[in-house]
Image (tube, grey):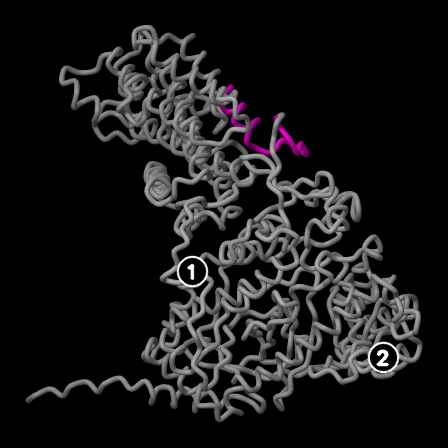
Amino acid sequence: MATQAAPLFDAATHARRWIADYCARSTAGDVLCGSDDPAWTAMFEELATVASDDLDHVRERVRRHAADIGMGFRMIGEADERPWPVSPVPLLIDAEEWAQISRGVVQRAELMETVIADLYGPGRLVERGLIPAALVTGSPYFLRPMVGLEPPGGKHLHFIAIDLGRGPTGEWRVLADHLRAPAGAGYALENRLAVSRTLGGLQGRINVQRHAPFFAAFRAGIAAMCRRTDPRIGLLTPGRFNPSYPEQAHLARYLGLLLVEGADLAALENQVYVRTIGGLKRIDALWRRVDPRMLDPLAFDSHSQIGVPGLIDAYAAGNVVLSNAPGAGVLEAPAFGAFLPQLATRLMGESLHLPNIATWWCGQSSELARVEEDLDRMLIGSAFGPVPLGLPGGRTVHGGELDAGQRAQLLADMTRRPQDYVGQEIVRLSTMPVVIDDALVPRPFTLRVFAARDASGGWTVMPGGFARIGEATDPRASVLGEGTWSADVCIHGADTVEPVSLLPAPDSHHVRRNPGTLPSRVADNFYWLGRYLERGEALLAAIRVMLGNSIDADGGAALSSATVGKLVGLIAGGGAAAHPPSLKRGDLTAFARQAMEDEGWHSVATINRLARGIGEGSRDRLSADMVRLLEAPFPTHRGMLDRAGSLQRRYVAIAGLSAEHMGRTAAWRFHDLGRRIERAMAMTRALRLFGMPGATLDDLSTLLDLADSQISYRQRYMTGLARIPVVDLVALDPGNPRSLAYQAERIGERLRDLPVLSDDGMPEPQQAHGRALAAALSMTTAAALEPDALGDLERRLAQLSESVARRYFLQGAEPLRAGGLTLA
């Protein structure tokens, strides 16, 4: 009997079934079930095309795309990053509704700019009683040193973020403002990239508005405020331990900004410079993600280790734009929400298009009485950010859910310090679909929207932002917290969207081969990344030779105890582990495990951690594959030899990526220079232990293993091992990529390609040391290479490393390192 063909997959049928099943379990106010927008059906049809009947598959697919982009985040107090949680189901908002939201965001931005300018300027709002003086002076976000300073460009706010909540009836309300260092724009961009790679046809079907014009407008807006026509703009980051550092690195790379830390910058004569390998380079604007109180230890917190002394003096002189202006975060205080509606009416002649959630500041007697009376029906939170003593658990609480003891404690502290508290209405949120256990389920969400000042001085709103989705089904905003998932937000409409991108036009004739400025700190990181990777590979080679020839040899001849003892000395001498009590199998196994895993020593695990830290702090300059290899977990193979082999292959893969995929930029030159110096040092130690007069056959074989030169030697010499040929191959053969001579040649090439400060044609110290090293090797022979000569070579390498660090890397707070340095 003929078999029937399987029915064709019908994406539209699946989409309708998913929507029907979802709406059957959702509640009133859901964005999907309360809408007749055909865009939702189109989106689910695209989702079904990718997922077939497996929603878990499309969820994992969008997460893989997010991982490929290289985004992540770190929770405060955690050492390791988490992958960024992206939902495959975007939030859809039609262009007409979005226009109303944008109108409200722009109005709010203009209002806040007006208020901030007055608070740091004439102070008329406080004088007229429209804002209580205690609300300003009592806020930790109010920075008194900024009073009277006119911001470069005349504006305090350049980039803001606003959290919105959608009520069950569809109205949008402002939950919070973010002005100090607004985060999340990079995550919105990453969500869009991950979802668009998964649902590739959605853009064309529903005309999704793009993010690129928003970022282009922001970049042009900052540039327009600078005094120079071709300004150098940086993104000032607190560093890789900041929770949103991956987002900052992603934004810097996308926008073409220089990612800098406070230590990269120096303020000199009211100008700000970035310390680079080519000297000090003037910087005109900083998009800061550093807490404003940490910006300048001379102006604000004197304990700050991440600020730039003198930065505010340069700002006051109008020579550097800071986005946003320090002190603008004063309006972030939740207590200001009680006054913004009235201020909008008095200053702008109209009500807020996006209303606040109702807020009562307890610093006023009538408002305090209102909050105490309606405590059971309000949220009680901090007025300014720092947590007052009366809040159990240090978080905003629902008054009606407090027990008797907590309630008494709260009321007592509100009586002592009422100005520290606000009462707010309880907001219930709409829900949206999210994939959980291969099903669509409703969860409450909030929306973060971004606005940036453009080149004309007006405001541009990012079409979308990103949504945060809660874990619990409770729709109250206070329960949502930070959310569990994020979702792309697609603004769609009938008009075709032009494919705008920050990338150059296909027919652009502009060519650039210079990758740009390299800060000294980044050069230092790449140099030590090369050294750590080479050091780890050399240590693994020694462990593998020791394990493979003294413990796990099956029937083969084991190394002599003298040679094994030298290997133990090589490993222990590098600080990787403590000397074992004996050379017995069990003691050597424990010794190898310590050298591999014990982070109390300079073990392989410690080296991996150091290299991983550099990789995490260099996301803007390393490929996602390189970062992924550096962050890969420590292998858990049962056998030590297998574990060492797995790690060594990972090191080889990283070396291959750096050799074949990294552009030959100054960053790569420092990375390769670090590798060459570390490899040369390892070879000098190995030669001194295993290649000197009196070396045994086991010693010579071990030397060839450590230099990965066994095959090269066997191809040249068929008569067996001899000391002089082995030493010549490992030390002096310029064609052997593991030899000392080869490293000296490469070191000389890298140093010749690096910038110098003087124009007199004379070699700088690092170049002189490199030439002396190459000359010493070229003038010796294998027979003359004695321990003293090798000791001299190792000292030369140490001097070379020190001179490279002295010339190119940061030396404490020293801004200048040589006479005749030009400032550009």
Q: How many marks?
A: 2
Quadrant into which the C terminus falls: top right
Q: Is residue 790 above or below residue 439?
A: above
Q: Residue 642, image x and y in percent?
A: 32, 40
| Residue 412 visible in the displayed image | no
Q: Residue 458, image x and y in percent?
A: 65, 71
**Disc 1 or disc 2, which is closer to the eye?**
1
Where does label 1 land, which residue?
Answer: 504
Q: Is residue 233 above or below residue 654?
A: below
The label shown at residue 371 is 2
Q: Is residue 468 magenta?
A: no
Helix, strand or loop status at disc 2: helix
Q: Is residue 242 above or below residue 530?
A: below
Q: How many C-alpha atoms fall within 10 Å of the one at disc 1: few (<14), some, or many (≥20)? A: few
Q: Give 76 or 32, whichever is nearer the viewer.
A: 32
Query: Bounds of the magenta span?
Result: 799-818
* Mark 1 or mark 2, earlier in chain: 2
Residue 626 placement, left or right of 317: left
Q: Residue at x 66, y 76 (%)?
A: 105
| Residue 631 visible in the displayed image | yes
Q: Residue at x 54, y 75 (%)?
A: 463
- Quarter of the image where one finds residue 50: bottom left
Q: Residue 529, image x and y in percent?
A: 47, 37
The label shown at residue 646 is none
Q: Residue at x 62, y 51 (%)?
A: 228
Helix, strand or loop status at disc 1: loop
Quadrant into which the N terminus falls: bottom left
Q: Residue 510, image x and y in percent?
A: 41, 54
Name the residue type under label 2.
Answer: Val
Name the residue type under label 1.
Answer: Pro
